[in-house]
Image (cartoon, rainbow, N blue to C red):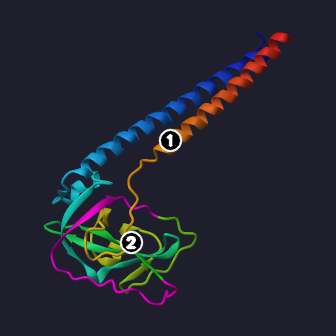
Amino acid sequence: MSLRFLLPSILITATFAFLVSLGFWQLDRADEKRGIEVSIKLANTGSVELIVEEGSLKNKEYYEVRLQGKYLSDKQFIYDNQIVNQVSGYYVLTPYALEGQSKTILINRGFIPWNGRRDKLADIDIGQDAREIKVLISKPIKRMELKPTEIGIQFPILIQSIDLQDMASLASVDFSSVIGLLDPSTSNGFVRKWEPYTGSIEKHIGYAVQWFLMALVLAIIGIRIAIKQRKK
């Protein structure tokens, strides 16, 4: 075997093995997400747990939980540029002071359409009496902004993305690292159609198929090169 043929053979073999390993890695990720999905479904079919320690919330993403505390209605945020059912509007984000805890959790109380009137907000006022709420725990995703936006200092404050540190500074509270999506069965909310946890299982399987197909194409190319080399 000539050196001219040996080097491409080694490169093709190594690349083939790498692509196949990526495919199996994606399948493993899909199985992992599938296991998480099953455990969350099982947890959410029983009684909803009452969380009294804020620190345990970070391990409850996608879980339904009950919280006790009170809303801080004078420090609300309007999360703008949202689309629900092809209608533009905003989410109402209200701080919720947890009972017996130093931290506050941000509660998404639901969607409100602008209805062509961006100069007029709906009535989002809510009492600050102690109450129990049911929420779905979620980790906020900071949306990329094409350009910096000016943020006001008068509540309710209009925001384009969720940055808990900046929002905590504006509201003079210490926010939890997660947020709560108010359950549709809980009062004092607006339109709520939260997406269930899927774990992107289909995405991982799609990536796996993509890597395997690339490996197959590379294998075909390698076989064709070997056949040509033998004929020479």
Q: Quadrant where the C terminus lies?
A: top right
Magenta stretch, overall SS: loop
For this view, does 202 lie left or right of residue 32? Answer: right
Q: Mark 2 points at which residue?
A: 166
x, y (%) of residue 163? 41, 68
Residue at screen point 63% across, 26% down: 16
Disc 1 to disc 2, how far (Cα)?
Answer: 34 Å
Q: Name the residue under label 1.
A: 204
Residue 130 among those drawn in magenta = yes
x, y (%) of residue 108? 34, 70
Under mark 2, the amino acid is Asp
Residue at screen point 56% across, 40% down: 207
Query: Foreground residue, 163 or 61?
Result: 61
Which stretch is magenta? 115-142
Q: Do the residues labelled 1 and 2 touch (CB within 8 Å)?
A: no
Residue at screen point 69% across, 27% down: 218
Judged from the image, the secondary structure of the residue bearing numbered disc 1 is helix
Query: Foreground residue, 63 or 69?
Result: 63
Which badge, 1 or 2, is on the more N-terminal residue? Answer: 2
Name which quarter of the figure residue 124 lies in.
bottom left
Residue at screen point 53% across, 69% down: 145
Compared with 91, 47 (above or below) is above
For this view, does 219 lie left or right of residue 4? Answer: left
For this view, does 67 lie left or right of residue 190? Answer: left
Compared with 100, 213 (above or below) is above
The disc label shown at residue 99, or none: none
| Residue found at the very far left of the displayed protein | 100
